[in-house]
Image (cartoon, rainbow, N blue to C red):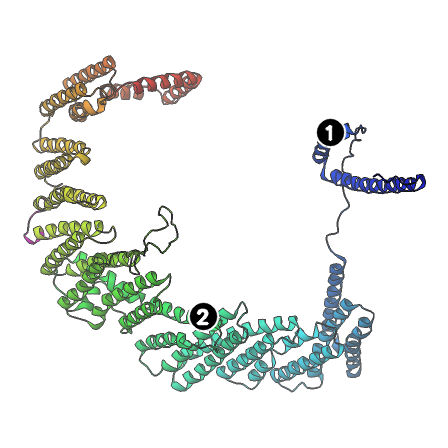
Amino acid sequence: MTNIPPPAEELRILDHELWQLDLRRNQLLARRAWLLNVLQSAGSQAARSWAQASAPTRAAANWPPPAPLPRPGPGPRRPEATAPGVQNVLLVLGGILLTVAAIAFTLVSWGDLGIAGRAAVLGAVTAAALAAPVPLLKRGLRSTAESLAGLGLALTVLDAYALHEVALPGVDGAGYSAVASALLAALWTAYGRVLGDLRLPFPAAMAAAQLPLLLWSVATGAGDHTVTAAVLATAAFDTVVALSVSVPPSVRTVAAVGAYGAGAWSTLAAVLLSWEADGPGAAARAAALLVLAAAIALGAAWRAPEAKAALGLASAGGLVAVAAAGAVLRPVLPGAWTVAACLACAIALPAVRGSWLPRTVRRGLWWSSATVQALTLVWTLPVVALALLGPAGWAAHVWSGAPSDARAAVTVSTSWPPGMETTPLLLAAVAVVLALTFRGGPHRQLALSAALTLAWATTVVLPATVALPYWATLLTHGVPAAAALTAAAYAPEPTPEPASTPTPALAGHPPTAARLSPVTLPVTVTALCLALLGSVHLVALSLASEAATLAVLGGLTALFATAAAWQTPVKIRAVPAAASLAYATALACATGASLDWQPHHIALLVLVVPAAAALLAPRLDDATLKVSVEITGAVAGLTATGLALAEPPVLALVLALCGVITAGTAVRPDRRQAGYAAAALFVLSGWVRLAAWEIGSPEAYTLPVTALALLVGYARRKRDADASSWTAYGPGLSVTLVPSLLTAWGDTDWPRPLLLGAAALAVTLVGVRHRLRAPLVLGGGTLVLVTLHELAPYVAQAVGALPRWAPPALAGLLLLAVGATYEKRLQDARRLRETLGKMR
């Protein structure tokens, strides 16, 4: 049932609804006005967007079109500086000017007044400046009070200066300054506590507290150790204040700056004192200073382990502690053992453990130890570089005689540095630390690689350090190379995880990819690189003796061949295979030189290596290994060619043998492309033989080859219509045209150029007739070159007869003509390119 209210009640309800609608309308209109102001500020683009978006609504409601929005005018300029900022600048400038005026009055105009007047002026001004902040603080003028308080503090310094100049002129300046700075620090602290609301007196007092101990030590004529101790004590005081939570932040900032500055200066001074110590007493005093500096740094890191500088402070404290230990031990130990003692102290630093020590401090000590170990390795670098690179000097004294010992073997062109007897011990110690520290985790492989490198460097330096005999040195260097190669070749296979254990998906691998064993690719590659580097170093050492060179090269050839034959877990067999063939090539050269053969005779012996590589490559199942063997064999063939360059007949034989080896390689289905190289080698061999026989007319020897090659190419085109003319006819035409062209350019008679030009013309016409690219390009190019050769004398004569301005003028006319018909020439060139592209 519908309940209809009485008319009076219904009228009241309608009035209430209309009143709410009017209220909502007023709200919407106010919001609309605000949005219009925003659009006016944003610009005309935003206004057009609003008009387009609201057009349907206004049309449906039959609203009038909106009035055009006025263009936004320039808004009120915002002030670039705030009122408090301007106030502070004015107050600071005023305080500075008053302070400068007071200084000028004290130093310049002081003599114009008597002692009573001077005391009255300074006392009155100082008292007024110090008392002025009291009423100002009550009125809430804190910035003005700070400015006047700063002026009062500066005046107290002038008062102290004036007191010394007038009442105490005979007192020592440094001692008086020490007492005055201490009193001023206390006075300013008390002044700040009395007023309470001022911030300037406390940091000013902290700054003044930096001077008393230093000035006191200077006043008493103390030595360098005492002055350094005074600065260290100041740094300790600053550290305590900086770590205190009850002092204002400004005081902590001043204290931190003082702690860092005084601590760094005093630590550097203590290090210099320890370095200059000439006895145990002086060294002990310097070490005590270093211990105090380390205690300050470590104490600060311990007290605030969460601070940003805690790790750096702990690291610095550990380094300074090691320096202190070195300062004590340096006068006692021999010079060569000082670094070893510092390294031992650094290695012992990470042993400081326990829950009582914060984690940040432990990390800092660890970084200190790592830094000292890195510096130790840097200290050993000169000896390692000498032991590694020194034997290269035997390249200028090959087979001049075996040296007496290992030190003489590595110091061919330099001398052994003194005081480096502990280098092998240092390298071995760091290697052991790396191997034992990283027993797991993501850095395990890198640490093992670094440890392996350091162990190998130890074996490189040890023979020269202890001056082993020469033959024992070769054995000492050969064993680590063989061990590193064995470690790379016999590395354990990767061990996959169980199938149920999920592993993260890697790029290009399924989620169930196997995870390698702890000793995997990085360590294996490092061992292989060390084996290669050690073998090269061993060869350089063996150059001193003929027998040693032959023995070392033979042993390395066999060693790397054995490593390449072993099925290694990673794809590294190509490297030992290439090294084996390279050392075999060197062995062939050394054997020929040992037999007093000429270089061109040695070249024939070197060809055994590429022949062996060509026979071995088809029997290899790994593509990378196969390519490595073939490339090394090709390099050996180039070496043989270089050795035979001085004898053309032997060079022709070497090229022919290289062609035979290459042709044998081209028999394989996957090496068909090597046939082109074989053909080139055979042709080159023939040319060299003709040059050796002093043949001036090569056509009699090249024309048969050309005819035979053209017949073969014709047969190839008959079987394969898609075969290119370059493949079918290019080699045959090149065999005759290229040598004849080279000979014609040096021939002064006319028959040869005429016949060659006629033949080239015929070849060109055949290419045009049958639309073949190779005859057209080779014949046309030969014809153009022959024509240029024949016309060159007449062109030179004509150019000589012309005035000197004629060639530039002709060139300019040519450029103008070409520029005028540039588009036509481009079309012709494009048409010629398309025509050649359609040929085969």
- In the picture, the disc for residue 56 is 1
**In which quadrant of the rendered image does the C terminus lie?**
top left
Q: Where is residue 126 in the image (x, y as percent from the top left)?
A: 77, 77
Residue extending farthest right: 8
Q: Where are the magenta residues, as a range? A: 593-600
Q: Position of residue 361 (x, y in %)?
A: 47, 73
Along the line of sight, the residue nearer the viewer: 27 or 763: 27
Please tell me whether mark 1 or mark 2 is closer to you in this view. Answer: 1
Residue extending farthest front: 1
Along the line of sight, the residue nearer the viewer: 232 or 493: 493
Looking at the image, residue 72 lies above or below residue 705: below
Whether residue 311 appears in this view of the structure is: yes
Looking at the image, residue 372 lies above or below residue 560: below
**In which quadrant of the rendered image does the N terminus lie?**
top right
- Bin the neighbour count of mark 1 within 10 Å (Cα to Cα): few under 14, some 14-19, many 20 and up: few
Along the line of sight, the residue nearer the viewer: 561 or 534: 561
At 35% from the left and 47% from the top, the residue drawn is: 509
Looking at the image, residue 327 lies above or below residue 516: below
**Disc 2 residue type?**
Arg
- Bin the neighbour count of mark 2 within 10 Å (Cα to Cα): few under 14, some 14-19, many 20 and up: some
Lower position in the chain sequence, tag 1 or tag 2: 1
- In the picture, the disc for residue 363 is 2
Q: What element carries label 1?
A: helix
Let me know if residue 599 is in the magenta part: yes
Residue extending farthest top: 769
